[in-house]
Image (cartoon, rainbow, N blue to C red):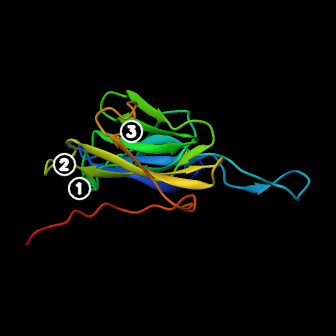
Amino acid sequence: MAPTIDPCYVFHFLNAHDAPDGSIVLHVMRYEEMARRAADGTTPSTHSAVLWKWTIDPATGTVREEQIDDRPGEFPRTDDRLVGLDSAHGHITSGTSLVCYDLATGRTTSHDFGPGRTPSKAAFVPADGTPGGAGWLVTYVHDAATDRSDLVLLAAADPSAPPVATIHLPARVPFGFHGNWIADRDE
């Protein structure tokens, strides 16, 4: 029997990994439904994604769903070195905030950039060679009042603290613009 879940939509995964018990664990941004026309057929309505955990048991063909948070968001990330492995931490963009999750304990921490300041997808920048260790979260933040953007670095260990650095850019970076961190390697 194939695993089934309630009808929903997922575009972005935070991470997925094989668990020691043989199950597959996925953390996903789940939409109840996507944009559709309003009742009058003219105006599109939109819906927001929230973070869910799916645990797939291939032996029984079942899927257990668990909603992790009710805050709307998107652009989930983790330390790229842990993609496909059990990662204890991840983060999403939610309105004017970056929300960080301790996936092992369920605790959340957030950094609110303030009214009119919207972060883009944040990348984890490692401070050393330890996957899931110390580092920074780097994101573009659009300021609606100035129509410019900043490049902002937060300490991953305490994202609610004031930024480690804010670099004022001379122009706006388009919303949703994102990328990856690639370390300079001496070879």
> If you read the primary sequence from the N terminus, does the residue marked by circle 2 or circle 1 appear first?
1
Depth check, front residue: 48 or 8: 48
Q: Amino acid at mark 2?
A: Pro
Residue 41 image offset from top left, x and y in percent: 88, 58
**Which label sits on residue 131?**
2
Residue 74 image offset from top left, x and y in percent: 52, 49
Can residue 136 be seen by looking at this rendering? yes
Q: Secondary structure at mark 2?
A: loop
Where is the C terminus found, in terms of image quarters?
A: bottom left
Q: In the displayed structure, would residue 67 be above or below residue 183?
A: above
Depth check, front residue: 53 or 76: 76
Q: Is residue 136 left or right of residue 20?
A: right
Q: Residue at left 84%, top 52%?
A: 38
Instruction: For the residues labelled 2 and 1, say whether their Cβ atoms are less than 8 Å apart.
Output: yes
**For the residues marked 2 and 1, what is the alpha-carbon distance in whole angstroms?**
6 Å
Report which residue position mark 3 lands on. 163
Report which residue position mark 1 lands on. 81
Q: Residue at left 62%, top 37%?
A: 115
Q: Residue at left 38%, top 38%?
A: 163
Q: Secondary structure at mark 3?
A: loop
